[in-house]
């Protein structure tokens, strides 16, 4: 019999013996002395529970309520309760800095099925600058780790739910860990909440609770037939034939009077009451594109001093 199979039998027999003697979850096993009860949810309300920092990484995880300190990243509140745990990516914690949070041990020796569910938040206002988060499993007290779930890049600005099937790990003692690597920007705060290892179908499914989810953006309006003759648009009642770009990072808005941010933007429209603008409060590193309709200039006279064919947009660009 191969050596690894012998070790598996020893772990199983010892765990079963402890369960019989104590009548409860074992308190000791080869390599593990920090067993956690299965089917119990950890929301990090009073502490990290049995989860603990790794000594070989670069950055520690933190507990927090409300939003994270950095703008443009992280959740605004916990998924459940008041607290959650997260990795702060502000300098010097990026780029490519690793943060690992280890779980206590879970005794799955007698489990027929097992799954691990958790809420996670991975959002950056600069989508290309977020790093990765992985859930990894070990059956040899951390000597080796296997990735069982991984997510990369920025996700929608809300809590997401993941449930990982751990059927391959039934019959053994298991330890998990969250392994995150920061992206190329401080807007790489990663967070988790409401973790639970369930056995034999006893888990209660998590449901998605939106957190600062962006408003639904209507699909772009198809460009109309090319305009011929003169054209004028002051955006008084709509965007006219102009339409949002679906592949950019922020949308244009219509407004009258001043913009919502002090010390920037016009105080009123150039002509009429309304104008189109880009709000820079949370999108100062994002691209916003507004597309025009098509213009048929095939028979137009070139625009020199005669101004026979000219496009004369009025624009405002100033920062505090």
Image (cartoon, grey):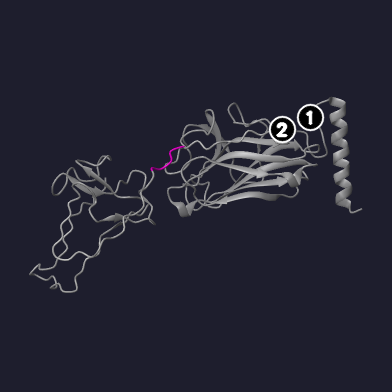
Distance from the alpha carbon under mark 2 to that under mark 1: 9 Å
Rendering quarter of residue 22: top right
Q: Is residue 306 above or below residue 133?
A: below
Magenta-colored segment: predominant secondary structure: loop
225 and 9: which is toward the camera = 225
Q: Is residue 271 magenta?
A: no
Please name whichever residue, 220 or 147, is drawn nearer the observer in this view of the structure: 220
Instruction: Identify the element where label 1 is drawn.
Output: loop
Residue most extreme to the right: 1
Q: Earlier in the sequence, mark 2 or mark 1?
A: 1
Circle 2 sits on which residue?
Answer: 38
Residue at 50% x, 35% y is: 209
Residue in the picture at 52% in, 49% down? 94
Label 2 close to label 1 by CB (< 8 Å): yes
Residue at the front extreme of this rendering: 225
> Residue 193, how many percent across, how many down?
57, 36
Estimate the x, y position of residue 220 in percent, counting from the top left.
34, 54
Query: Could you classify mark 1 by the number of other residues whose Cα lies within 10 Å: few (under 14), some (14-19), or many (20 or more)?
Result: some
Decide if residue 55 is in sight here.
no
Residue at image x 18%, y 47%? 236
Image-based side of 303 in relation to 126, left or right? left
The local secondary structure at tag 2 comes to loop
Residue 225 seen in this snapshot = yes
Residue 243 position in % (x across, y down): 29, 55
The quadrant of the rendering that contains the C terminus is top left
The circle drawn on residue 117 is none
Q: Is residue 161 left or right of residue 202?
A: left
The magenta span reads 211-215
Tell me where residue 291 appears, x and y as whole percent: 29, 59
The residue identified by callout 1 is 25
97 displayed left or right of 243: right
């Amino acid at each position: 019999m191969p050596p690894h199979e012998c070790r598996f039998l020893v772990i199983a027999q010892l765990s079963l013996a402890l369960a019989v003697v104590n009548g409860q979850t074992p308190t000791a096993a080869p390599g593990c002395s920090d067993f956690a009860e299965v089917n119990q949810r950890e929301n990090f309300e009073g502490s990290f529970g049995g989860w603990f920092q790794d000594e070989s990484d670069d950055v520690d995880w933190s507990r927090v309520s409300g939003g994270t300190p950095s703008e443009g990243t992280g959740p605004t509140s916990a998924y459940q309760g008041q607290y959650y745990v997260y990795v702060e990516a502000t300098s010097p914690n990026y780029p490519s800095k690793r943060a690992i949070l280890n779980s206590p041990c879970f005794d799955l020796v007698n489990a027929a099925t097992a799954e691990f569910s958790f809420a996670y938040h991975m959002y950056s206002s600069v989508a290309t600058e977020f790093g990765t988060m992985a859930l990894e499993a070990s059956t040899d007290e951390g000597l080796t780790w296997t990735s069982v779930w991984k997510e990369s890049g920025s996700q929608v600005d809300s809590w997401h739910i993941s449930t990982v099937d751990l059927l391959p790990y039934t019959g053994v003692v298991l330890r998990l860990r969250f392994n995150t690597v920061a992206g190329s920007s401080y807007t790489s705060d990663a967070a988790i909440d409401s973790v639970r290892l369930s056995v034999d179908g006893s888990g209660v499914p998590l449901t998605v609770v939106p957190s600062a989810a962006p408003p639904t953006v209507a699909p772009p309006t198809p460009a109309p037939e090319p305009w011929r003759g003169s054209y004028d648009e002051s955006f008084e009642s709509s965007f006219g034939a102009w339409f949002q770009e679906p592949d950019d990072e922020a949308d244009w808005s219509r407004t009258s009077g001043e913009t919502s941010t002090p010390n920037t933007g016009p105080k009123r429209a150039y002509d009429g009451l309304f104008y189109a603008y880009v709000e820079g409060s949370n999108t100062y590193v994002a691209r916003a594109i507004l597309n025009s309709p098509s213009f048929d200039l095939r028979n137009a006279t070139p625009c020199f001093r005669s101004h026979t064919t000219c496009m004369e947009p009025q624009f405002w660009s100033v920062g505090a």
